Image (cartoon, rainbow, N blue to C red):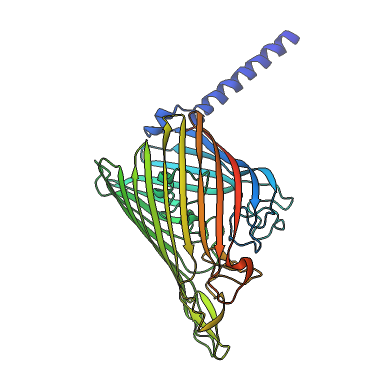
Amino acid sequence: MKPSFAKHLLFFVALFLLTTATQAQYLWNNDSAFKAGRANSGRIWGYMFGDYYYKGHSDSLQRGNGNQYTGIPKSRSAFQFRRIYLGYDYNITDKFSAELLLAAEDNFPAGNPPGSATSGDELLNNKETFYIKLANIRWKNIWPGTDLVVGQQATPAFPLLSEKIWAYRSIERTISDIRRTPSYDLGAGLQGVFDPKTKNFGYNLLVGNGSSAKPEADNFKWFYGDVFAMFLDKKLVIDLYADYERLGWVPENGDIQYGHVSRQMTKAYVAYNTPALTIGAEGFINHLQDGVAATNKSDGKTTYLSPNATGLSLYVHGNIVKNYLRFFARWDTYSPNNKVDNNLYSAYKAGVSTIGNYVDGTPIGATNDITYKQQFITAGLDFTPAKNVHFMPNIWYNHYSTQLAGRTGKINGDYDMVYRMTFYFVFGK
């Protein structure tokens, strides 16, 4: 009986391993088959980045909206992950493919109450957890050069082009990403080129909820679109982007004068991009209709203003030793409110256009200062001992200065300074 039992056991073990191996071929099909769009081919991929950081100086008023160092005291040091991605891409047929991406990201400063609106992607016990960032199906070439994408997907704002050319998301977000323009949304989009043979001219359109991974909370949709052109053998890249979302509608009623509350961004991007050297510039104007409530000096009543938030980012990165050592440097300037008038108004508060007490990424804090300008600088080296493995010593600096009159002390000028050793590695692609 024992030899017979052993034979049967070996048979079932062999059958199980054979079945598992057959199923696994769909997961572990070689990358060339996946890239060729072969049916039933897929790949698991991911990347991670984080740092060892030391906080050299801390802004006394804890400004800086959602950056990961706001509120962290001077001399604090720690190891941290800022993003962990785990994705699976799958070709259903040569015409249809699916994408799933799980993400764990530290989007907000450490130390906020667990489960609060600014505690990042954390459980109630402060442990980070994955959430579904992308989940979509792509219908390829619904007409020549254009794909239809339905589901949770990357938006045209920056992930499809400008973020890739910046190439250092592991160091910092693009300037429009910092201001909370969605990088992903649930909706339906068209991604295409006007010239399928050369792919030098293209466009991306998306209609989404405007709530990223969260359920829709209103009847208003976010509309995104960009057009791009590439010249000089794709070295010169130009991109024009715009979006629009109505954030609320309140009829005029007594002293309440606001009505059409909305956000509308226009952004331009240009880069000269080669493997040896890249120079880029990205700037935006974000119109916030009835986005700020200002107190009149004359009678104390409220006037609703429609300011333009503006930002400009300039950067360069390139080779020092090819395939081994690179450098990067970037400077940003940002102003949330061009309607500051110290002769007419005594205070500025968020209008009804705020979501979660934010006006275009600027929080309502104890100083009630939604007017402060920011200057951001980062620079460092990128050491690559192997392909897809990076170690990057860098500095992270953000300076704050108010536009309000009569303020004294550090509200007129203070900063966060962080020294970091960033690590970044990619697998599966």
Q: Position of residue 425 (x, y in %)?
A: 54, 35
Which residue shows up at 55% across the image and 56% down it?
398
Residue reaching furthest to the front: 409
Asked if one can make out residue 1 in the rendered structure from this viewpoint, the answer is: no
Camera-nearest residue between 140 and 50? 50
Left or right of 118: which side holds 90? left
Asked if one can make out residue 281 in the rendered structure from this viewpoint, the answer is: yes
Q: Where is residue 6 in the image (x, y as percent from the top left)?
A: 70, 12
In this rendering, the answer to whether 71 lies above or below 45 is below
Left or right of 428: which side holds 415? right
Which residue shows up at 58% across the image and 88% down it?
300
Which residue shows up at 54% across the image and 63% down it?
361
Q: In which quarter of the image is the N terminus?
A: top right
Left or right of 142: which side holds 151? right
Camera-nearest residue between 73 and 161? 73
Residue reaching furthest to the top: 3
In this rendering, the answer to whether 277 lies above or below 61 is above
Q: Position of residue 52 (x, y in %)?
A: 64, 41
- Count of numbered labels shown in the rendering: 0
Camera-nearest residue between 194 and 151? 194
In this rendering, the answer to whether 291 lies above or below 124 is below
Image quadrant in which you'd find residue 362: bottom right
In this rendering, the answer to whether 8 lies above or below 59 is above
Q: Position of residue 188 (x, y in %)?
A: 42, 55
Which residue shows up at 54% across the image and 89% down it?
255
